[in-house]
Amino acid sequence: MALPRLIFTPEHELFRDTCRRFFQAEVAPHAERWREQGYCDREAFRKAGAEGLLLMWADEQYGGAGIEDFRYEQVMFEECIRHGELGLFLTLHSRLVAPYIGALGTAEQKARFLPPCVRGETILGIAMTEPGAGSDLAGMQTRAELHGDHWVLNGSKTYISNGQIGDVFLVAARTDPAQKYGIGLFLVERGMPGFERGRNLKKIGLKAQDTSELFFRDVRVPVTNVLGEPTQGFRYLTQFLAEERLIGAVQYVTSAQVAWDLTLEFVKERRAFGRPIGAFQNTRFKLAEMRAQIDALQTFVDQCVMLHVEHRLTPEIAAEAKLLCSELEGRVTDECLQLHGGAGYMEEYRISRLYTDARISRIYAGSSEIMKEIIARSVGLDDRRMS
């Protein structure tokens, strides 16, 4: 029995039922086909929009519900992992990209972009990572130059989620070579001349999630597609990192819980030497240890969620949650696959997908090494000042 969670109200649990039914009916039946084709159907976004699951925070004038309580988003993330398909990146669309438009966009930009995003007709992506620059934004090579009423964008990005099905990408590009972090944020739309997509990259996990290369060759981006000040993109990006890492922590601990649930069921039924393998001390001790670790981190994540609801979550605490939960997910899915024995290595068993999907969690949204650096600096262990 998992530790009771105290942060949800009856309204949240009613919403959980709605999400569960949606993912069971509209996502789960298509998940295997999506993994084989390498991307999710666009129709899934439209159906999620019709159900009111996209951009719930958006004002009613844009078609949203105006719900700022992050717990509703948390519930949706959890149910998508439990009953849907992790590769359906509704989170990227609704909580990692669209909020930039909501917070930084002009009235015209919000009126133009948010309504079709709420309906799931326009799918969003974010393009920061480059072949030679991942976590180090100072190494960004993509550049934008101002020419009258438009910017000319040149460069390339890689490992971009929703890269094949996306319609509008938030592209980070260097705008002031004299500044180390002189970066602008540009809304690049499908069909703009010079904007091209590369191949859908093959991955060891997240098979249903399309991940692509993007190329920009003299793309003319109107000044009306610039978010905020064109040299302050780095500052804007850092403002949204705490939530991005919290979202990751929510997902990682949920994946660990699902892996544990599947394994508990498996060890009760699978027999060896005349007994269920759950009767062996090694199995019991492994599952007991994982149960305690999941409960502890779920409690920590729920506390972080409440801090975020109260606008008190710091980037450093979010980094702790991201670090610990991604590492836990890796350990738990590995141990649970081991307890499945040979069956765990077969793709027909869900534990194999949870295992391969989990490997990216310690890399994207800031690697574990970057999270440790952030935490160390927050306690005064900054090598730049100590050397």
Image: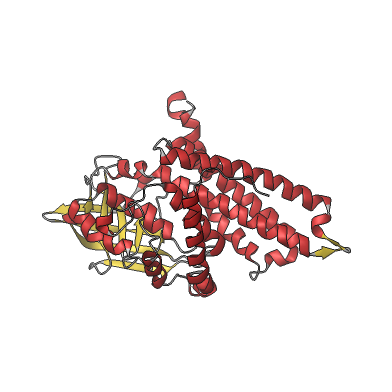
Q: Is residue 154 left or right of residue 310?
A: left
**Which residue is located at x 42 percent, y 50 percent?**
134
**In the image, 233: left or right of 206?**
left
Residue 27 lies, with reference to residue 182, above or below; the image says below
Q: Which residue occupies the foreground of this view, 28 or 4?
A: 4
Q: Which is more toward the observer, 266 or 61?
A: 61
Residue 199 lies in what quarter of the image? bottom left
What's the image's color scheme? secondary structure
Against 43, residue 144 (above or below) is above
Q: Looking at the image, which residue sits at the far top?
A: 386
- Residue found at the very far front of the displayed protein: 10
Which residue is outermost to the left? 148
At which x and y percent is residue 369? Answer: 52, 42
Relative placement, left or right, of 117 versus 276 is left
Frontmost residue, 204 versus 133: 204
How many discs mark residues in the rendered view? 0
Camera-nearest residue between 22 and 268? 22
Which residue does the image show at 74% across and 49% down from the upper left?
286
Q: Which residue is at 53% across, 73% downward?
A: 29
Viewer can see residue 61 = yes
Q: Where is residue 203 in the image (x, y as percent from the top left)?
A: 52, 64
Most distant residue in the right direction: 274
Residue drawn at point x = 10 percent, y = 54 percent: 148
On the image, the x and y values in percent for residue 382 come to: 46, 28
Whether residue 173 can be seen here = no
Residue 274 is situated, as x and y percent measured from the top left of the image, at: 89, 64
As displayed, is residue 161 above or below residue 67? Answer: below
